[in-house]
Amino acid sequence: MLDHSYIKKLAEEVGFDLCGLAPCHHLEEAEVRFREWIARGYQSSLGYLERHTEKRFDPRLLVEGARTAVVCAVGYKNRMSDGYPAGHCTKVASYACAEDYHTSVRKMLQQMLDTLRSEYPTLRGRAFVDTAPLTEKLLAREAGLGWIGRQSLLVTPTLGSYLVLGELILTDEADRYDRPFAESRCGTCRACVEGCPTGAVMPGRGIDTARCISCHTIEREPAATIDLDGWIFGCDACQSCCPWNRRAPQHRNRAFDPVFDPLGMDAAAWFRLDEAEFERLCGRTPLTRSGLERIRGNIVREE
Ligand code: SF4
Ligand code: SF4
């Protein structure tokens, strides 16, 4: 049987700020709501969201015999997270200024999994970082980490929403589980609904991806009708306005130190870069997912 306290200590040792444990089961209600969201077409061209819906809401379909979800979070808030000065037209989402979290968080989870396997030799499990169809935010709420904000992100009382999640889905039961985070602490706040430049945060919670700048700068070709509001990779507007993020501390895990400074770069600086310089400056960051040409395309749309 997995030791709840030991796992939390291990998570802290490898560099996570938060960790919670939840039993694996089918999140039926959430699946119904997600299917309704898809039926209304809010996923727009992000077709991958329509696939593997059953797996998304039941970790036991991803790892046979899964009993325990260990949900870990690490904060990445940095000086870009509070928002850019007015008029800055080459804004980069703050998470993207550091090393790609897929790399850093996977390393941390793997370290935990290796240690757990040596402690519990019959244990099986898998690490997940935003790659498999797994409803991470809802699992995090089940594991007591926080609630789902109006902007559809996980918000935690200590770190706000500037965090990255990673999960271990394990086959053993734990001696204790955390209580799900039952309430929403958004209260009457609507800052993210009002702060979204394109009106993509829907009043009833959820994002219309067809209007979301983050999707338009990264995951899909930008539609001519979408004003990118100076963002060239991602968008933090519905997070920088959140009161829970204002009071959140700066990141403490050095893996999330920014590796380049978008505040010190204007459009001309981006256009002066050649591919080799771009690789040297941003090669370890998620910006390479888009590439220099796409990023320049987003700048051109702003001019
Ligand atoms: S990421 Fe930007 S565009 Fe998308 S919902 Fe948030 S504020 Fe709106
Ligand atoms: S900005 Fe306000 S409504 Fe939006 S997630 Fe934060 S607390 Fe909730």
Image: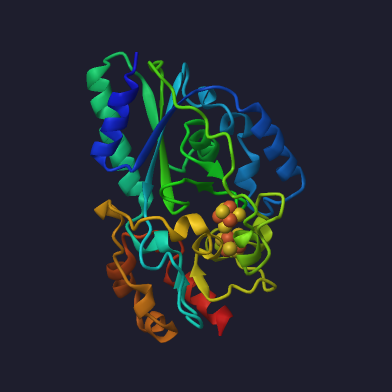
**Residue 195: x percent and y percent?**
61, 66
Identify which residue is drawn at 74% across, 40% down. 36
Query: In this picture, is 2 found above or below 138?
Result: above
Callout count: 0
Residue sitting nearer the eye, 147 or 65: 147
Q: Quadrant of residue 172?
A: top left
Identify which residue is drawn at 37% across, 83% down. 269
Q: In which quarter of the image is residue 173?
A: top left
Residue sitting nearer the eye, 125 or 292: 125
Identify which residue is drawn at 23% across, 37% down. 13
Split into quadrants, the picture shows ligand 1 in the one at bottom right
**Residue 3: x percent and y percent?**
32, 19
**Left or right of residue 36, residue 223 in this image:** left
**Left or right of residue 284, residue 133 in this image:** right
**On the rendered image, what quadrant is the C terminus found in?**
bottom right
| Residue 215 visible | no
Q: How is the image coloured?
A: rainbow
Query: In this picture, is 259 found above or below 153?
Result: below
**Residue 250: x percent and y percent?**
34, 58
Query: In this picture, is 70 found above or below 288?
Result: above
**Residue 214: x percent and y percent?**
55, 62
| Residue 258 visible | yes
Residue sitting nearer the eye, 269 or 98: 98
